[in-house]
Amino acid sequence: MPRFDVETRAIWGYLDSVIRFPADFTWGAATAAYQIEGAWAEDGKGESIWDRFCHGGGHVVGGDSGDRACDHYHRWGEDIALLRELGVGAYRFSVAWTRVMPDGTGAVNQRGLDFYRRLCDALLEAGITPWLTLYHWDLPQALQERGGWARREIADWFAEYAAVVARALGDRVRHWIPLNEPQVFAMLGHLIGHHAPGVINPLGFGAVAHHANLAHGRAVAALRAEAGPGARVGTAMQTPPIHPSTSSPEDAAAARRFDGLMNRWYLDAVLRGRYPEDTLELLGPLGATAAIKAGDLELIAAPLDFVGVNHYTRVFVRHEPAVPLVALLPDEARRVPGAQYTDMGWEVYPAGLGEVLGRLRDDYGNPEVVITENGCASPDRVVGGEVADAARIAYLEAYLGEAAAALAAGSRLTGYFQWSLLDNFEWAFGYGKRFGLVHVDYDTLRRTPKASARWYAALVKSGEIRGGAGRGV
Ligand code: IFM
């Protein structure tokens, strides 16, 4: 028997039904260190690849950087008060590796650990469960200089860091996520160079993609050993549906290839203990064959407690015969007539969430799933002290409707984290893209909860969505 009741499925832009989630469903909000903390060189913190990438200039819209960001490093008390107002039971944040180990390995910076200890203590006191991500893209620059993700040793370095954090915080933290979106940092950082460290090296991409999985596996083992008996360890994967741009067989083949690179390379390794053969054919000559050693896949596929899904949109892919590698990249020019798009230019496509959850249920053994990120960017402004972000509310209604439908269809979905608590540094897009439930004025750092924050608080409190709320904002 399902433990909830969906009277109708959500329909984008129009929903007049009531959706009820289970009473023990986890409701949360998420952030990441580099995107909100600021204080980039304070209290012994080392330099990360994102510090270097932003300071180098020319990579980020407007020359923005995370130097100050939302100044969460100093304003975390205020941000916990915002979480309390939302009423969420869980908060997903990441630890900045360089605060804890400025050079990535070796010396531990006690002041860095103390910051996260204080944060966790205050969360627990507020009745909010910390969910800790170890790596949300801010690799220590010192490790980049030793080869970074291209080196097999990255897995040792990451395991060492995981053990340090687990020993320091394991008495406070039960929920652990080693890597945020390995597919995204591998591809954007090492294949097309849009993200730090800005590497464009197709010939080494296969090794990076394997080392990301290996580092995940080594960190899972370190957490199991060091984080205490009650530790729950999972993932946060960005595994969008990949659709062909047209009905041509060439586009279908390109979409299948891209699905291998983006999704199956990670899902199959972690959940099935093997690499998909078609993707191995592509990545093998790009360094993967040399990188994969006996025993790696057993380690990578160690059992998990949950699979985290970060979800926003679907991706179209078209075949591009002139430039073979472009066939591996999304077709960003493809627009769906009549569809709505967020401020990121991402299609609002709630059915995609149902597709991802259905795939995990039907093809990957129906693991426990948590939506570790979902949300949208919109051009929000404070007018008369209010932010009327109706489009965000409509987006969330529609996506949560899909989540509820997946639950009804047997998915073991146990939680949902809204991306993001605050407007923040959106990587190569800088501060122009606002994903928060709470608006941040980057001059004054004033926080203003948006209409969507009140909407989300009502959902968290009642466990129910009453359709159409976004239209009234
Ligand atoms: O802001 C990012 C986050 O860091 C990782 N997932 C996607 C979000 C929106 O782009």
Image (spheres, grey):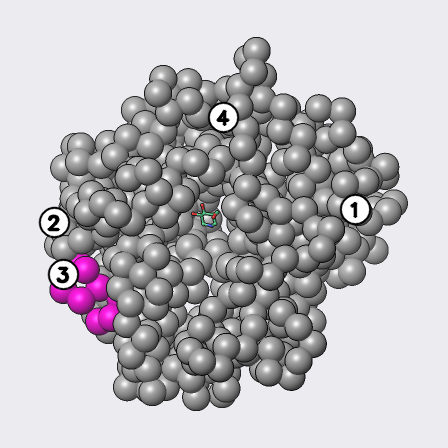
User: On the image, numbered disc 4 is attached to which residue?
Assistant: 439
| Mark 2 neighbour class, 10 Å CA radius: few under 14, some 14 to 19, many 20 or more | few
Nearer to us in this view, 278 or 362:
278
Indicate the quadrant where residue 122 lies.
Answer: top left
Q: Secondary structure at mark 4?
A: strand
Disc number lying in front (4 or 2): 4
N-term mark: 3 or 2: 2
Q: Secondary structure at mark 3?
A: loop
Disc number lying in front (3 or 2): 3
70 sits left or right of 435 in the view: left
N-term mark: 3 or 1: 1
User: On the image, numbered disc 3 is attached to which residue?
Assistant: 145
Q: Amino acid at mark 4?
A: His
Give coordinates of residue 145: x percent, y percent.
Answer: 14, 61
Q: CA distance from mark 4 to mark 1?
A: 27 Å
User: On the image, numbered disc 2 is attached to which residue?
Assistant: 107
Give the number of the disc on residue 10.
1
* Residue furthest front as drawn: 322
N-term mark: 4 or 2: 2
Indicate the quadrant where residue 5 lies.
Answer: top right
The answer to the question of whether label 4 and label 3 lie on touching residues, with beta carbons closer than 8 A, is: no
Q: Amino acid at mark 1?
A: Ala
Question: What span is in magenta?
Answer: 143-151
Give coordinates of residue 300: x percent, y percent.
Answer: 41, 73
